[in-house]
Image: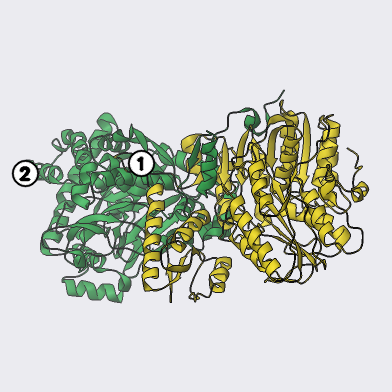
Amino acid sequence: MADHVELRTGAYYDSVSLMQVSRSVAAAPGVEAAQVAMATELNLDVIRGMGFDVPDTAAPNDLVVAIRGDDAGVASGQAALDAALAGLRSAATQSAGLGEAPPRRTLGGAVATSHANLALVSVPGRHAVVEAFDAIHAAVSVMVFSDNVPVEDEVRLKDAAAAADVLVMGPDCGTAVVGGVALGFANVVRPGSVGIVAASGTGAQQVMCLLDAAGVGISHCLGVGGRDLSSAVAGRSTRQALAALAADPATETIVVVSKPPAPEVLADLEAYAAGLGKPVHWATLGTGRPDLTSSVEALLAGVEVPVPAWPRWGTTSEPGPDGGSLRGLFCGGTLADEAMLIASRQLGDIRSNIPLRPGLGLGRDLRDAGHVVIDFGDDSLTQGRAHPMIDPSLRLERIAAEAVDPTCGVLLLDLVLGHGAHPDPAPELARAIRAARAAATAGGRVLPVVVSVTGTESDPQRLGSCATVLAEAGAEVFLSNAAATRRAVALVARDGSRTDSGTESSGIGAEQDTTTGEGH
Amino acid sequence: MTTQPLHGLLTSEVSVAAAGVSLFADALRAQAVPVTEAAWQPPMPGTEHDLAVVLADARRQAANAEALRRMTAAGADLVDVRPASEALGLERGTFLHAGPPISFDRASGPLRGALIGAMLLEGLAQTAEEAEAALEKGDGITLEPCHHRDAVGPMAGVVSPSMWVYELRDDVHDNTSWCSLNEGLGKVLRYGAYGPEVVDRLRWMNAVLGPILQQAVRARVDQQGPIDIKAIIAQMLQMGDEGHNRNRAGSLMLLRELLPTMITADASSADVAEAVRFSGANEHFFLNLGMPACKLSTLAAHGIPGSSVVTTMARNGTDFGIRVSGTGDAWFTGPANTPEGLFLGSYGPEDANPDIGDSAITETAGIGGFAMAAAPAIVRFVGGDVPFALRATQTMYEITVGEHTAYQVPILEFRGTPTGIDVAAVARTGILPQINTGMAGRVAGTGQVGAGLVNPPAECFTAALAALARSTG
């Protein structure tokens, strides 16, 4: 068995392409393990964690190739690598004809050539600001999917954008729908009259999917970036998005979806929204504030649509005999936030890489014996890697680890469908769930698994079939992330306040009453 | 009712331009949304921060647009031919040279050779050895870049007081530029040759050619007005020249303009005949007019606060230097690369000197290598193939702020040539300006050994970008 490690300089490929390359190299005959990635700190950690010895000279713009196998395996891995990279290159250099212009190299060039009216930036975060400025300079609104963008750059971008009357959706904006066109991660929902302003990608997806399940459609979903409602950014894009939806003839009702906002920013925005002439609902998470499902229900009441029975799948599982801790492994940051807000009310402190308050952070190994919720989509876990909604490998590894951890009492997972996400994520996750439950059983434990699936029947992956695949693997599946969380909490709660939300059609347990009733 | 917010985005059909992960573009295509993807690559290493600062500079867009406007609006009229001592105020012992500032001890072979030849021409030394020793010692000798006097010189670019220079005017911006007279090809001073035939030719040019051209130009100005060099450049690009390494059509058109007043000059018929023959035989007769025309264009664009447009690219055979509109008169230099291309006779790559000459002013102003698509025949001279020539021009649009309004490329549907190199675009794309150039022998006294293609060193552009970022922050 031999390790082959090499660095290639001057070769840049995006993380999604490299994920596919890694897979084809790992699948080559005789290869035991392989990883092909840009040499970001995170990827080097992963590759070194696999036992490979990577030279210290590796810089973020270098390509690292790490292949383990017997001699023939390494050779076949290298052959697979060359073939996969050649495939990427030939796709990238299509223009060969005499006089045919080479492809434009910058976003500004692409905008100028195409006269596009919307731009999308998903380059690595440290390069995203420059591309976004191209769009602003061309008077084109831009969605910045990239994360890891410094907040002062975000403020600069948004000030320049406001001056040019264009919207910066982002940075770290995963989701937008403009005139029915889904950008980034977005679900296929019916057209309608609810306009969404989203400082939270997966939060917006959850809201639009719940609305869709209730038969209510959306006009637009304008992302603003996860930090827009922070004190530093002060709602710069939210204000512009609200004004645009207020002027939009297709929009009748507006809902703002956000992770916990800065209170003074929220207050300012509420005052601003009051003068827009259209009802504005606030699905802004926070302690003592309604969860997303409750916010959607309040909105439905406002538009006089009855709240449906939120869909669920699977048979009710039995809790483990000795409780154990909640382990929430999320791809969606807002879904993770919502889960922590709901679960901490009964379970107390939850440790996380995106903790509700300082002091609850996890170490670099992301381990703790108590209740843990991890957002695998957080900046620190995506440097040089594709988002977990595309590349689930880090989370799948963690599911396997939890299966043999005696302190894990229940697994709470999310699965987000729609455009941009993994084209068929359910079978892989179902396999992991089945394997985890089997491993726990082998260890003399019971491991219930609860999954919230954010999706619609019109999504390319189909909500119903994904949920069924997961349910068949033994998971309890909910459309409402709040309901899923309550169910998971019930499975580990030891204080006797256990509620079996699985039998409640609305998914809203009695303990919710304290958090509803926000005036709109 | 005012116009819709966000330029009407929410009520328009969406079409998208994307940079980054192809997955998202694919997802849009799956929804039948038009998508144009940039072939994005990371910028030159270490430029991320400077790029973010420079791109955020609110002045930059307007400043670069103004730079382009001035570059393309600048005129270039040939108004006079005069000795350098008179036109440039050059004093005995002062020598202008190509490229950024350099001392004799760092000068490469061709520049040393040309300075030796100029010392002999000026009578400051009797032998090459004596000239070299005096230059080494430096007493009473001043070396200065042509660019510091708004002049330009091809290859070594050495101008001494007795040499005659063309004088060009840009009346739009009230600028003047100068350039020496072209000596032809082969063993010539600008390629570092300084043998007796070189110095004799220079003496004849001072004594015969210069005065005849002066009379011709002055008479022409009196009769018809000055010769519009910019108009000749525009025409030559449509006749297969690129204005740097191919000047055939331009040279013939220039001769056509000058001939009527050359032949009526007050000189012996033998001298007139020789001046006409010499000029007509020289395929690069026009280069020394095209260069100062380009200098006037870039000079007009210099000194605009916030502009990231390159206004000078020049080489002294050791260093490649650039200057940028928004960073004043600072030079940003790096080691000059050695051109690759085709060689004369038995010369080979080991004989070639690193890149030299102010002639990259042509690329700086949007012709030369940037107009290579207009001159497909050039590939027989500098190497490459015809698709390469087309691709070279098309690639340069990626690093320029716009297109020339007067200089056009017929095969690209008369698209204006890529004009106004943006240091930020160079750093972002990693695309370096394409320069077509002659190759001088690395040993002083050799002369021309070939012609080829070369790029500037990247550090000129990253250093200029950093300076621009500092001046912004």
Where on the picture, by quarter, is residue B124?
bottom left
Q: Image quadrant for the C terminus of chain B?
A: bottom right
Q: Quadrant of the N terminus of chain B?
A: top right
Residue at 61% from the left image edge and 38% from the top image edge: A182
Hue of chain A? yellow
Hey, what amino acid is under mark 2? Ala
- Determine whether, in the image, residue A314 is placed left or right of residue A38: right
Q: Amino acid at mark 1?
A: Arg
Label 2 belongs to which residue?
B270
Q: Give the chain letter for green.
A: B
Whole-number angstrom distance, CA of label 2 to CA of label 1? 31 Å
Which residue is disc 1 drawn over?
A: B169
- Total residue callouts: 2
Question: Which mark, by number, is residue A514?
Answer: none
Place of residue B354 in the rendered image (x, y in percent of width and height, measured from the top left)? 28, 64
Is residue A283 depicted above or below B88 in this figure? above
Q: Chain of mark 2?
A: B
Name the spot of residue B190 as percent of width and height, x first. 22, 58
Closer to the chain start, of discs 2 and 1, is: 1
